[in-house]
Amino acid sequence: MAVGDRPTKRAGEDAAATAAGAATETKAAASQLAPITTGELTAPIVVPNTLWQAVNPLAYDGGRPAEITHLREFGLTDAGRHDDGRWGGLQVIPTQADNILDLIRANSLWPLLSGLACCAFEMMSAATSKNDMDRWGMFPFRASPRQSDVLIVAGTLTTKMAGPLVRLWEEMPEPKWCVALGDCTVSGGRYKRSYSTVQGIDRVMPVDVYIPGCPPRPEGLIYGMMQLGQLVKDQRGHWPEREIGPTVPDKI
Amino acid sequence: MPTRPVRTNSRPKQRPPEQHRSEDDPRIMLDREVSADLYEPIPPYPTRTEREAEFYTIGDGEMFLNLGPQHPATHGVLRLVLKLSGEQIVDVDPVLGYLHRGVEKICENSDYYHVIDQVDPLEYASALFQEWAAVLAFEKLMDVEVPPRAEYIRVLSAELLRISSHTLFMGFLALDMGGLTPILYSFIERDEIVEMLAALTGARMLFNYFRIGGVNGDLNHEFMSRLGDWMSRAAKQTEANTGLLNENEIFVRRARGVGVMDREMALRFGVTGGNLRASGVPFDVRRAHPYSVYPQLDFNVPTRLEGDSLARYLIRMDEVRESIKIIDQCLNNMPDGPVMAKLPRLLRPHPGRAWGAVEGPRGMLGVYAISDGTDQPFRFRIHDPSFMNLEVVPHLLPGNLLADTMAIVSSLDPIMGGIDK
Ligand code: SF4
């Protein structure tokens, strides 16, 4: 079976048929993913988008197989292949102290300053004078992923930007949370028909809060961040039970 | 052959076996066999042009610095690969495409009404101008007469947005040079203007307000009262805001004389808008190729000769003052009447082609539309000023210090949505 492929066989097929199917699929996938040579650079690269799978495969997209996208390079990395526990990969164990520390974290969520497109303007609007997010401890944005707790993905995520963005996410220290701001990041939004966007960032990273809207109002972002704070409080001290996502990729 | 710094996506040959979910029970993980071919490294990206080969050949004492695509001061997802010699920039390779969303293709598969919505997220700081260019091209294509009241409402709302965009520009320019205060003030103005426009159009950023043959909805009470409030203090507030930077010695000394773009260079690269006028060319689409009711309005085209970052900033502040004048005149001259022309539900223009261009906050925003007689444009080409403006960056940066990069790039006011489309 192709690397990272979601199991697409329906129940009821016998084991032999599955094995044979898997063998042919491996071949097909291998030829598809063969290293590109110099002359082939202009040819379109199409591979299955299998970057990250939900805990429950039926939860997203009705359990249908992931669509075809162009994320070839990224698909070859660890993040594209592995499905380790979000915390298990990092060997982080919450202690009793985290029952208290999570309360503190919930009230001081520092976002990463990372704007991708239009929604970033509303994110900045939420952080500046009129809708001052700082009032709820969502401190004005940090420029370094090492210093931030929340990744607010504000704007359209294209396949070209997916690699750098996942890398940012992986550079953030645990515990960390992800907020999908805007229709583009929630589901693809108005670019559902586009050939170059990622149809929802939950295909490449786990998401804790979805804020729909094109763009959402700054109040929407603040509300979403408050919901995130509540989520952190509710789940305090229970990290391993959280949703799982990609491990740290070796090289993107 | 010189090679780029190698980005290996390879992984070690010995790996733990892959896992996949059991089909019967998604909670169970099963190991799977993986073909060894899949672990072959992707070969280093070969250089494709002479220019690329030259750029990625590193000289004595030189180094590469990657600025972006994630950088707090790149206005989105612009990536600049800088070749440095010490602190000095030797060469620049801008890498675009991190926000390519395929809008032109989507537009070609949408009907004419739908296109107006789809072009909004391109020039996202001032979406009405992008709509206007599309609408202008379509109106030429279909020979539609726009009622005068609709034209005035268009000018009014668009000039408001120009003020918002230029005020934001001021804030971002200062932010990129390390000053946090101006952006707090510019967002006060911007939030007030977009709330006002939200009362008029229903949206804060992506308005979808202009229609082929008019606008969607007449002026309403909330918009007018907010506008009245704001206009009463707009001129004074603008002076106060510009005072933050104009009288700031650090800002002026950092911005003066860096990134000088001379007249020839600006014309050669097709730079338009404030960046061109800061280099001494008084070209403004509103005057050079008049559209809408601009010929009946009285405003100046501010021009400066220096062509440096400071001039580009000052030009935009002058334009804010002119826009306030225009809004004043619109409010005084606003005629009565309908705001939409009578049009069929389904538009099928005759085969033909049309070019519509407006003066956006960043320069000439054009749309070239070809109709083949169906209800969808056959070709929909967007000419974005930010792209042309960004083209001069590799010629402005070399010789400057690394710290000046943002003072220069930011003063060109690029918007990545329009550049990458
Ligand atoms: S959701 Fe809308 S506003 Fe946000 S990035 Fe996408 S197109 Fe832009």
Image (tube, coloured by chain):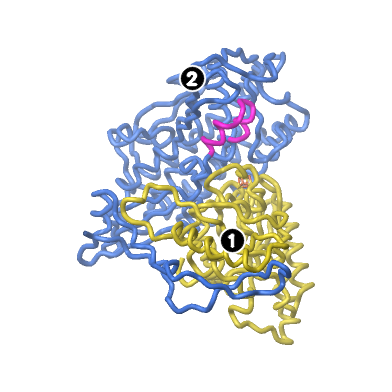
Chain colours: A yellow, B blue
Left or right of B2, for residue A73: right
Residue at disc 2, secondary structure: strand
Residue displayed at 40% across by 26% down: B283
Query: Furthest-bottom residue in view?
Result: A96
Residue displayed at 67% across by 24% down: B215
Foreground mark, 1 or 2, reads 1
Query: What residue is shown with label 2?
Result: B354
Q: Nearer the viewer, residue B30 or A218?
A: B30
Counting every numbered tag in the picture gives: 2
**What secondary structure do most residues of the magenta stretch adopt?**
helix
Q: What is the quadrant of the N terminus of chain A in the image? A: bottom right
Left or right of A185, for residue A70: left
Whether the residue carrying mark 1 lies under 8 Å from ligand 1 is answered with no
Where residue B45 sits, quadrant-wise, is: bottom left
- The region drawn magenta spans B103-118
Q: Is residue A158 magenta?
A: no
User: Residue type at mark 1?
Assistant: Val
Where residue B404 sits, quadrant-wise, is: bottom left
Where residue A54 sits, quadrant-wise, is: bottom right
Q: Is residue B365 above or below residue B91?
A: above
Q: Nearer the viewer, residue B188 or A229?
A: A229
Task: Check the residue under mark 1 and report the chain it is in.
Answer: A
Is residue B20 in view?
yes
Task: Check the residue under mark 2 and report the chain it is in.
Answer: B
Q: Residue A214: image x %, image y %?
A: 67, 44
Is residue B174 in view?
no
Q: Is residue B296 above or below residue B26?
A: above
Residue displayed at 45% across by 59% down: A33
Q: Is residue B162 above or below residue A102?
A: above
Query: What residue is shown with label 1?
Result: A204
The reply to the same-chain question for discs 1 and 2 is no
Q: Nearer the viewer, residue A120 or B46?
A: B46
